[in-house]
Amino acid sequence: MSTQGRRGNTHQRIQDVALELFSEQGYEKTSLREIAEKLEVTKAALYYHFKTKEDIVISLFQDLTRPIDDLIAWAGEQPRTLETKQEVIRRYSEALRSAEPLFRFMQENQAAVRELSIGERFKERMLTLCDLLKEPDSQLADQVRCVTALFSMHAGMFAMQHVEGDPEEKRKAILEVATELVTAANPPSRRPARPDSAQTASP
Amino acid sequence: MSTQGRRGNTHQRIQDVALELFSEQGYEKTSLREIAEKLEVTKAALYYHFKTKEDIVISLFQDLTRPIDDLIAWAGEQPRTLETKQEVIRRYSEALRSAEPLFRFMQENQAAVRELSIGERFKERMLTLCDLLKEPDSQLADQVRCVTALFSMHAGMFAMQHVEGDPEEKRKAILEVATELVTAANPPSRRPARPDSAQTASP
Amino acid sequence: MSTQGRRGNTHQRIQDVALELFSEQGYEKTSLREIAEKLEVTKAALYYHFKTKEDIVISLFQDLTRPIDDLIAWAGEQPRTLETKQEVIRRYSEALRSAEPLFRFMQENQAAVRELSIGERFKERMLTLCDLLKEPDSQLADQVRCVTALFSMHAGMFAMQHVEGDPEEKRKAILEVATELVTAANPPSRRPARPDSAQTASP
Amino acid sequence: MSTQGRRGNTHQRIQDVALELFSEQGYEKTSLREIAEKLEVTKAALYYHFKTKEDIVISLFQDLTRPIDDLIAWAGEQPRTLETKQEVIRRYSEALRSAEPLFRFMQENQAAVRELSIGERFKERMLTLCDLLKEPDSQLADQVRCVTALFSMHAGMFAMQHVEGDPEEKRKAILEVATELVTAANPPSRRPARPDSAQTASP
DNA sequence: TATGAATGAGGCTTCATTCAT
DNA sequence: CATGAATGAAGCCTCATTCAT
C-alpha cells in the first residue's frame, strides 16, 4: 500500500481511469470531460487533483519510470557481462508486463507524447537501456540485435495479441527470442578467451 | 515558379505538406489551418481537394498500401519457401525506405490511426504479412521470430536514428537481422524425414 | 411549350431539381452543391443560369405567381358576388394542385421565405385573395371563415396526406368544405334585395 | 439587476432568447453566436446548458408538448361525444394562445423542424389530435372539416394578424368557426337506426 | 474536497460566390 | 455553356482551463 496509501482515493481513481482511456482511445482523443464522466465527478474536480491534463500523464509516467530507473540503476552496479544483459532483458520484460497499459499508451501515442515534456525523458530511458545492452564499438548488426531485443518486447505486446495462446506463454516466448538476440549480439569470443577458437576474429 | 509550380499540383502539395506535418507533430496536433497556411491557401481550398481531414490521411495511406499490397500479391503467387520469405522481408525493407515518413507517421500515431477507418485495413495488411512469414502450427517462439522480424524493421527506423552510421548501412544491418530471424523461424528440417519423398519439391 | 421553349433545357432542369430539393429538405438545408450534384453539373454551371441562390427561388416563384395573378386579375373583373367567390376558391384549389411542390415549399419554409424578397410579394398576393373573399365590414367570424377557406386548402395538402383515399377525391372534399365556408361567410341576406326574405338580417 | 437577475436563470434566458429569435428569423437563420451575443455570454456558455442547437429546440418543444399531451390524455378519458370534441377544440385554442411563439415557430419552420427529431413527434401529436376529432369511417368531407378545424387555428394565428381587431376577440372568432366545423363533422345521427334509442337526435 | 458556471481559443466543415479559362 | 480552383465568412461544436462558492 505504499504507493496509494495517501488519503482519499480519488487521485488514484483518476489515474486509473485516465490511463485506461488514454490507452484505449489515445491521449488527444480523450477529453477531461470523458474522464470526469466515467468517474462521476466534475471536470473541476480533476483540477483539484491535477494542475493540467499533462500533469495526469506525468504522474502516470512516474509510476512507470520508477521500475525502469530501478532497473537502470541496478544494471549500473553489475558487471557488464552477458548474464547481466540477459537479466536486464528479463527484468524489462517483467516491467512491461506489470505496466502494460502504460507501455501500450506510450507506444501508440508517441507523437502525442513527444510534445509532452516527458517525451524526452522517456526516450532517454530507452536509449540508456539500449546502451546497457550494446557495446558501442560492436558491429552495426549487433547493435541492431540489441535494439531489436528491446523493442521486440514492445512490438510483441501489440502484435502478438492476434496469436492465440496463453499470455504468459507468449511473454516467455518473446523473452526467449529477445534473450537470443542479445546473446547473439554479445559473442563470448569478443574478449580473448575462447581458447580453442582459432578465431583470429575481431578486436 | 513564384507560387511553386502553379496549377494542378495543389492536390499533391497538400499531401506532401500534410504528411510532413502529420509525421512531425502527429495527426491530432496538426490542424488544417496549419496545413493551409504552410501552403498559402485557405482552409476551404483543402476542402476542394479532400472531403475531410481523414480523407487526406486515407489518400496518403493508399500510396503506401499499394506497394504492400503488391508485395502481398506477389508473395501469394510464390511457393511458400524460406527463400520467398526472405525475399518478402527484403522487399518490405525497401517499401519501408521508400515511404519512410508515412510509416513513421503510422507508427507514432497508432492510437489516432486506429479510429481512422484505415486503421483496420492497415492492421489487416500487417497480419497478412505476418501470416506469409510464419507457419501457423509452428512453435510460439518461431512465431515470435517472424513477428519480430517484421516489426524490428519498423522499430529500427525510429530507434536506430540515434546510432551513428550511414542510413543505408543501417538499413542493411536491420535487414540482415530480420532475415536471420525469419530464417531461424523456418527451419529447413521441419517435416523431418519424408525419406521416400523424392521431394524435388519446391519451385 | 411557351414557357419552356427557350433553348438548352438546363435552366429548366435546375428549376425542377431545386424545387424538388427545396420542398423536400427545406431551402436552407439545400445547398447549391447538392443541386449541382443531382444534375451532374458543377456549381459554377448554376451560376451561369442564375445569379444567386435566391434567384432560383424567385424564378420558381414567378411560375407560381402567374396563375395566382391571373386569378386575382380575373376576379377583379367579375362582380363581387358569392358565385365569383366560389369560383375563386375553385380556381385556387386548382392552382394549388398544379403547383403543389411550390406551395408546399412556401408553406414549410415561411421563415426562410420571409427574408427572401419574394416573401413580401407572396404575402400580398394572399392578402389580396383574402380581400376578394371577405367583406371588410362583415363580422369577425365571417372574416375568419374566408381566411380559413383559403388556408384550409393549404393545410389540407399536408394534413390530409395521412388520410387514405384518392388524392383527387380528397381535393374535392377540401374544396367542398372551403366552398361551404366561403358561402357561410357571405350570407345572401347581406345586400337588401331578397324581397321575400324577412331576414332582419345580421347584426 | 445589472446583468439581469444573475444566476441560475441562464438556462431560462437562453430558452427565451432562442425562442424569440427562432420565431423571428427562423431556426436556420438564427446562429448560436447571435443568441449568445444577445445574452452577453459566450457561445461556449450555451453549450454548458444545452448539448446542441437542436437540444435547445427540443427543450422548447417539451414545454409545448406537455399541454398538448395533457389534452390528449384528458380526451382519452372522456366519452367520445361531440361535447368532448368541442372541448378539445376549446382547450387547444387556449394551448395555442399560451405558447404562441412556439407554435408560430413550428408553423413557419416546418421544413427545418421536420429533420429535427422532434418533427416526427410533433406530427404524431397532431395526428392523434385529429383522430380524436374525426371518426375514421365518416365521409371524406367530414374528415376534412376536422382537420380544418384544427389547422385553421394555426393558420388563424398568422393570417389574422392582418385583420384589425382585439386579439382575444379574434381568437374567439376563430374558435367559433373551428367549433362549427367540428360540430358539422360529427352529426348526432350518424348510426341512424338504433330503433329503440329514443335519440331524438339526428336530422 | 468538490461543483456550477463560464470562457477563449481553436477545431473541422460547409456555404454561396467568383473568375480565369 | 460550362468547369476547375479557390475564397471569405460563418456555422456548430469541443476543449482545457478558471474561479467563486
Image (spheres, coloured by chain):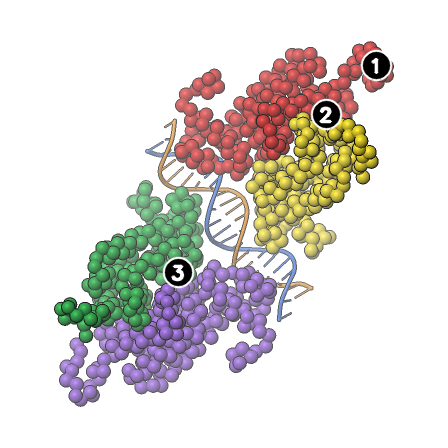
Chain colours: A red, B yellow, C purple, D green, E orange, F blue
Identified at 35% across, 50% down, the residue is: D59
Identified at 65% across, 27% down, the residue is: B140
Q: Nearer the viewer, mark 3 or mark 1?
A: 1
On the image, the x and y values in percent for residue C187 come to: 23, 80
User: What residue is pinned by disc 3?
Assistant: D109
Chain under disc 3: D
Establish whether labels 3 and 2 are both on one chain.
no
Establish whether labels 3 and 1 are both on one chain.
no
Chain under disc 1: A
Q: How many marks?
A: 3
Mark 2 or mark 1, which has the lower sequence index?
2
Identified at 68% across, 24% down, the residue is: A177
Residue in the foreground of this view, choosing between D143 and C121: D143
Identified at 63% across, 23% down, the residue is: A172
Name which residue type carries label 3.
Answer: Asn
User: What residue is pinned by disc 2?
Assistant: A145
| Real-space Cα separation, disc 3 to disc 2, in angstroms | 69 Å
User: What residue is pinned by disc 1?
Assistant: A197
Residue in the foreground of this view, choosing between D42 and C197: C197
Could you tell me if residue B2 is visible in this image? no
